[in-house]
């Protein structure tokens, strides 16, 4: 088990290396430069100074080697957009907020999604099933930016019981967390239902029922455990995505998280931030998938973490 | 320094126009000049500057005295974290401009240069050496006196290549500035000298009538010792030393910045707002919702909300729209057909209906622009002079026929590009339709996100591109000398040797009357005779403000909180 985990973690190294090379190459091949964002281009002399200041006048492979050398020592470089901040500072400042928001979002998704799916599966083809799946359908089809504005309109502007935006208090967290969680909840509900329905048809469930096990125990102890495997599979990337920030939710609710840096850094060609956020996302994704695999092992003893 | 702010705001806020508000009630447009004249010394006459409440119906918005908290704190939003606020190292935004003081200020309403860091000034007979008398009895927030040496240091740092200040080119008129900036001469050779503690001289390479007013937006005095001691961290709240009306006392990155009144500011007695809390909110719509939910006290109204704000009872009296010093225009790429042809350019220019554009699309108090330099600037050509290419579909069709493209037949595929924003897209769609309706020409729209825009513009991939220009200082030299003169103009812009001569002549001319005549000739030559670009409109700021607060109109770019006042009635 420990050997498996260590091996998986070592695999993250080549993965990150390949991602860093591809990202570095791609971002330097798109037109524009980090300082080109005005109505009128900077005078050549000023641009030259800025490029030299950030060593962008060197060949790309040199820049890469320098970058990766610094990155290995934990220095992700300066931001060009926020000139007096380093990428380390940006991540340190914004990532924790995205993590808190993301964990609460995942929690909401699980708390709403899984029970909804169970109810739908157990009460298969009844009104409860249709209602649950209708709710899930709405959750899947209404995009976060619409959901966010509906919630703001109802709970802030009309009822006046919650603030519109910003981050810091419990009240301020409710709307963004719900917005973020509801999309995931819908996915989880549908997945839980489908998976549980399939498992409930298995022979071992019939056997359990035949032995007189109560329906509650059948569902929770016997069926759900197996049915959750596809749910856990999806939960990995879902969690990684939520933890690293949602651009839409963070933007609408003015939450100073990491999400905006993914998009904004590409728009303004803030190379070190592009690299830093991409590598961070890669690491979180690798970690989340590792956790998923460990969870498999815990849920289903038949899954072995052997060398093969 | 506005260019970057504007475009940054455009990129980040999704829609175009920038900051600063007005005290003019929407329901009393006739009050514009009167209220505007009262505005600058607003601190002395809070009652005269009529927040909408003054002009509104007596019900609803009547303000109770208790609505004004003590001490006075106001909350508003900014679209992004201020980032680098060192005014010698970056473009200057509100947070920098509130903390450090330039030599002079400019009153955009009365059109005059006002004392600021300098109480008086004079210029030598040859108009080359300016002498500034620095304010005495004025101290940094750490108790040290502010002296001419502080200004000398600040100007040196702006042109110092080690600082890599993106605005350094604005000081090229100063003797040796270019050589210092290229690293060919030491910073001590810059033509800015502290003669004694309270006398500063600035030597220019050429006479420049616009130079004085341009100092209202560049050359803020910064504290040398603090700056050298803390390096890049010197502007952090725990280190910063200021001489302006406010000081940053709290700064949560990406979240909020608090400006508190600085008692060492020379005019602190007139500053009414004790605390300005700036929330970082990128989405304009979110900011608008926060305003409506009482979470902030004033906000820019997104274009999409203007109609609603003007109709809803609770908001319409708080709405104000006033022109600002920014021109939006369309550029032709003249290095390839069809816009290398003057007649084609004229045809497209004559087919733009600016009045419809403003009444149907932008919907604020924007002003149709037939020339480049905005009203209120030296060198602005009044509409009554008839300069420019007016909207005339018949003439436009004739131009296109004369050019050999009757009804648009034979024209290559044309692309109109703009930097992606809600407003820019709506304007482009309207003009696309005008060209289709009046000229029969199909133009394809192309929105550009982020930093690739300027590169795409210069590549010539788009035949017509949207551009905007916010005035750094109120003089046509800022438009023509720094935008369209061949030696500085952007690739694809029409270049005319005789225009260059006129621009150079106007830049060094000292006589105001002659300068005005020259700029009229320049606008006529570039806009009317050669259709170099199509000016569209001079932008407006559209704001809503809570009744307790007076937000004076500031056509300049920056919000000047020191002039904001509280309504006590």
Image (cartoon, grey):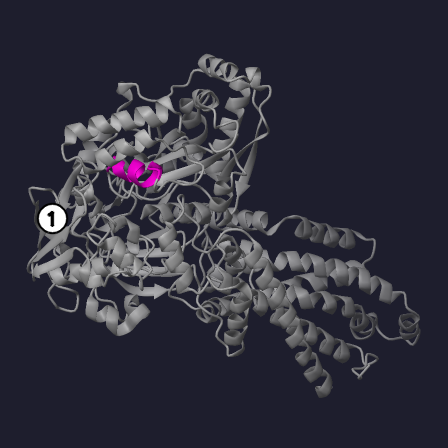
Most foreground residue, A298 or A270? A270
Instruction: State which quadrant residue B367 falls in.
Output: top left
Q: Is residue B2 visible?
A: yes
Q: Is residue B421 visible?
A: no
State the image coordinates of residue B471 (x, y, percent, origin top left): 30, 41
Instruction: State which quadrant residue A118 falls in.
Output: bottom right
Within 10 Å of disc 1 (Cα), the crowding (few <14, some 14-19, many 20+) is some
Q: How many marks?
A: 1
Is B149 on the left-hand or right-hand side of B496? left
- Name the magenta segment's main secondary structure: helix
Q: Which residue occupies the extreme bottom position in the image?
A: A2
Is A111 on the left-hand or right-hand side of A37? right
Which range of residues does the magenta coloring cover? B475-486
Residue holding disc 1: B130
Is A268 on the left-hand or right-hand side of B219? right
Q: In the image, what residue occupies the spot 49% across and 46% down?
A: B455
State the image coordinates of residue B79 (x, y, percent, origin top left): 40, 51
């Amino acid at each position: 088990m420990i050997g498996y985990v260590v091996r998986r973690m070592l695999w993250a190294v080549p993965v990150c290396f390949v991602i860093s090379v591809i990202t570095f190459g791609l971002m330097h091949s798109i037109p524009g430069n980090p300082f080109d964002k005005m109505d009128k281009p900077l005078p050549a002399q000023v641009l030259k100074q800025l490029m030299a200041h950030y060593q962008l006048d060197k060949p790309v492979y040199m820049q890469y080697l320098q970058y990766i050398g610094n990155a290995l020592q934990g220095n992700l470089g300066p931001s060009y957009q926020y000139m007096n901040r380093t990428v380390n500072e940006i991540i340190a400042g914004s990532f924790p907020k995205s993590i808190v928001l993301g964990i609460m979002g995942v929690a909401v998704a699980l708390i709403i999604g899984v029970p909804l799916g169970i109810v739908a599966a157990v009460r298969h083809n009844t009104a409860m099933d249709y209602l649950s799946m209708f709710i899930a359908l709405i959750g899947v089809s209404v995009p976060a930016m619409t959901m966010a504005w509906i919630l703001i309109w109802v709970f802030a502007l009309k009822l006046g019981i919650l603030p519109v935006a910003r981050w810091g208090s419990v009240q301020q967290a409710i709307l963004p967390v719900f917005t973020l969680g509801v999309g995931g909840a819908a996915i989880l509900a549908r997945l839980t239902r489908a998976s549980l329905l399939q498992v409930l048809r298995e022979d071992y469930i019939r056997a359990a029922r035949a032995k007189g096990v109560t329906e509650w125990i059948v569902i929770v102890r016997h069926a759900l455990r197996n049915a959750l495997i596809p749910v856990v599979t999806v939960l990995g990337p879902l969690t990684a995505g939520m933890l690293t920030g949602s651009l839409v939710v963070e933007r609408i609710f003015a939450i100073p998280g990491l999400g905006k840096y993914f998009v904004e850094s590409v728009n303004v060609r803030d190379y070190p931030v592009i690299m830093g956020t991409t590598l961070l996302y890669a690491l979180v994704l690798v970690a989340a998938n590792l956790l998923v695999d460990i969870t498999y092992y815990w849920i289903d003893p038949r899954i072995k973490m052997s060398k093969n | 320094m506005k260019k970057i702010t504007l475009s940054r705001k455009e990129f980040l806020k999704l829609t175009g126009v920038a900051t600063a508000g007005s005290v003019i009630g929407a329901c009393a447009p006739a009050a514009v000049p009167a209220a505007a004249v009262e505005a600058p010394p607003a601190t002395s006459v809070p009652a005269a500057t009529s927040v909408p409440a003054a002009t509104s119906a007596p019900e609803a918005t009547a303000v109770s005295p208790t609505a004004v908290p003590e001490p006075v704190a106001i909350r508003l939003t900014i679209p992004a974290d201020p980032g680098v606020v060192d005014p010698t190292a970056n473009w200057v935004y509100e947070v920098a401009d509130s903390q450090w003081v330039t030599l002079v200020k400019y009153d955009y309403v009365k059109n005059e240069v006002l004392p600021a860091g300098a109480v008086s000034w004079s210029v030598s007979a040859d108009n080359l050496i300016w002498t500034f008398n620095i304010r005495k009895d004025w101290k940094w927030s750490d108790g040290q006196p502010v002296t001419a040496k502080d200004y000398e240091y600040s100007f040196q740092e702006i042109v110092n290549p080690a600082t890599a200040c993106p605005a350094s080119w604005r000081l090229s008129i100063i003797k040796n500035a270019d050589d210092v900036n290229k690293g060919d001469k030491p910073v001590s050779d810059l033509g800015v000298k502290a003669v004694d503690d309270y006398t500063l001289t600035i030597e220019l390479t050429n006479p420049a009538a616009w130079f004085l007013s341009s100092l209202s937006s560049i050359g803020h005095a910064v504290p040398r010792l603090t700056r050298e001691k803390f390096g890049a961290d010197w502007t952090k709240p725990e280190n910063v030393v200021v001489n302006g009306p406010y000081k940053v006392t709290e700064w949560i990155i990406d979240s909020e910045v608090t400006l508190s009144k600085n008692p060492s500011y020379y005019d602190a007695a007139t500053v009414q707002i004790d605390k300005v809390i700036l929330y970082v909110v990128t989405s304009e719509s979110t900011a608008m919702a926060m305003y409506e939910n009482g979470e902030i006290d004033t906000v820019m109204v997104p274009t999409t909300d203007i109609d609603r704000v003007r109709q809803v009872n609770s908001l319409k009296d708080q709405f104000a729209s006033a022109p600002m010093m920014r021109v939006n225009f369309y550029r032709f790429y003249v290095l390839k057909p069809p816009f290398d042809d003057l007649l084609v350019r004229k045809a497209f220019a004559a087919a733009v209906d600016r009045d419809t554009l403003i009444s149907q699309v932008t919907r604020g108090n924007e002003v149709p622009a037939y020339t480049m330099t905005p009203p209120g600037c030296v060198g602005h050509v009044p509409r009554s002079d008839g300069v420019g290419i007016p909207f005339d579909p018949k003439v436009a069709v004739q131009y296109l026929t004369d050019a050999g493209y009757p009804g648009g037949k034979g024209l290559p595929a044309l692309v109109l590009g703009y930097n992606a924003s809600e407003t820019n897209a709506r304007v482009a769609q309207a003009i696309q339709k005008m060209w289709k309706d009046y000229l029969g020409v199909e133009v394809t729209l192309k929105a550009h996100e982020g930093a690739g825009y300027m590169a795409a513009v210069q590549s010539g991939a788009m035949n017509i591109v949207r551009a905007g220009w916010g005035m750094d200082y109120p003089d046509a030299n800022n438009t023509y000398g720094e935008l369209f003169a061949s030696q500085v103009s952007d690739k694809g812009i029409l270049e005319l040797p005789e225009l260059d001569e006129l621009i150079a002549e106007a830049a060094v001319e000292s006589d105001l009357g002659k300068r005005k005549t020259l700029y009229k000739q320049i606008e006529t030559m570039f806009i009317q005779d050669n259709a170099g670009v199509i000016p569209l409109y001079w932008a407006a700021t559209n704001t809503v403000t809570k009744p307790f607060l007076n937000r004076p109109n500031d056509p300049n770019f920056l919000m000047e909180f020191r002039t904001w006042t509280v309504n006590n009635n």
